[in-house]
Image (cartoon, rainbow, N blue to C red):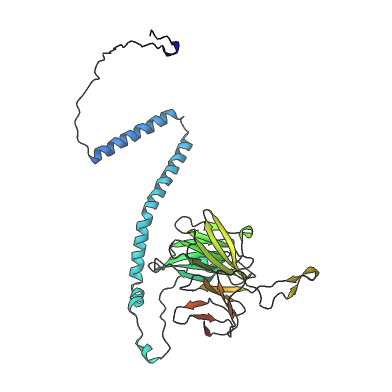
Amino acid sequence: FSPSPSPATQTYNNPYRDRGVMTEPPPRGTFSGFATQWGIHDTYVEDLERQEKEKEKKQPRMSSKDDSKKKKTMTTEFQSDDISRLTKPAKIIERMVNQNIFDDIAQDFKYWEDTSDEFKGNQGTLLPLWRFSSPKTRKLTVTSVAWNPKYSDLMAVGFGSYVFLNQVSGMVLFYSLKNPSYPEFIIETPDSGVLCLDIHPQHPTLFAAGFYDGSIAVYDIKQNLESPLYRCDVRSGQHLDPVWEVRWQKNDFDDNLNFYSVGADGRVVNWTIVKNELRYSDALLLKMPSGPTDSGPGGIRVQRYEHGRCFDFHPTRDDLYIVGTEDGRILQCSKGYSTKYIEAFSSQLGRLCCPVEYVPSENICLVQCGLESQNMGSYSN
């Protein structure tokens, strides 16, 4: 102990000790051999057989019926695996056979030219090339066509019905010019017929579709063909009438995918994909120019809306777009104003039956086609 008078600082120092242990060295052996692919394969096969034998010893013995059922299931699994392995080579061979069969049509597609067009003035000649058909769409009507922006030979075709009193289910088929005999992808929409669709310009596997019941759906043909990734309902902003056109737009400020839709209920809706949710906001309400004209119960004035038919966005200015109504009016609108449009053009062609679009030129023009007439009109702004 320390002779210090303070007891709080007294410590005890343990003595140092050395301890050693003697052990026998482990046994050693020398091994040499050659590692080949077949040797490794045989070793894995022997190990797999040994594991299967151990599992059979642990499991109780089955009857002959159960054993036969197990063998059948195993054979079907092996067959399905073999078929899945042959899917891609068979698809390539099918395309090669079809290209040989339709070689004349492919040559006409590249090099055919009618020499008599020089003497016809403004008239020309159209040569029918491919005919795309499927037995699943015999009773359906082609409602929309969209070409893939990345794969120039691939197009999406929407099927529905314009007989509104007798609506049926719809389909979306993807056809390729490399194989016109059968569609590449088939998507069935049992709830309602497809009226419009649009493929994303940066994501070629992603497309949005509008239906007769007013719903909107987003599909990804790379992930799932049976059900959409996103679909709206009545609680999440669904249109009350048929959706006539959808159009993808550039990503918003938060880099979220978004697109627009126009419907016969008089709404232009902006849809945004946020994580696992499809959100909506009304971009414009197409109110009648004369104001409320109908009277509801108790003499309440009811606001009437125009039926939106089509729309198109400005090629250089992202904030401007035009909307065509069923009555034949063309409205120039802005994304910054959700309550009213900027300017309206009265059509002389009657009701609209096909989309309007901007023509990129020195003077921006609006082109449309009327239902009562077969003419086209242009309007410069």
The residue that appears at 58% across and 83% down in the rendered structure is 347
Above or below for 47 versus 110: above
The residue that appears at 53% across and 80% down in the rendered structure is 368
Relative placement, left or right, of 369 versus 123 is right
The residue positioned farthest toward the front in the image shown: 5
Residue 295 percent across, percent down from the top left: 76, 73
Residue 378 percent across, percent down from the top left: 51, 83
Relative placement, left or right, of 290 versus 61 is right
- How many marks the image carries: the answer is 0
Residue 88 percent across, percent down from the top left: 37, 57
Quadrant in which the N terminus is drawn:
top left
Can residue 181 be seen in this snapshot? no
> Could you say which is closer to the camera, residue 163 or residue 352?
352
Can residue 209 be seen in this snapshot? yes
Residue 265 percent across, percent down from the top left: 64, 69
> Could you say which is closer to the camera, residue 125 or residue 364?
364
* Quarter location, residue 169: bottom right
> Could you say which is closer to the camera, residue 43 or residue 361?
361
Relative placement, left or right, of 316 versus 86 is right
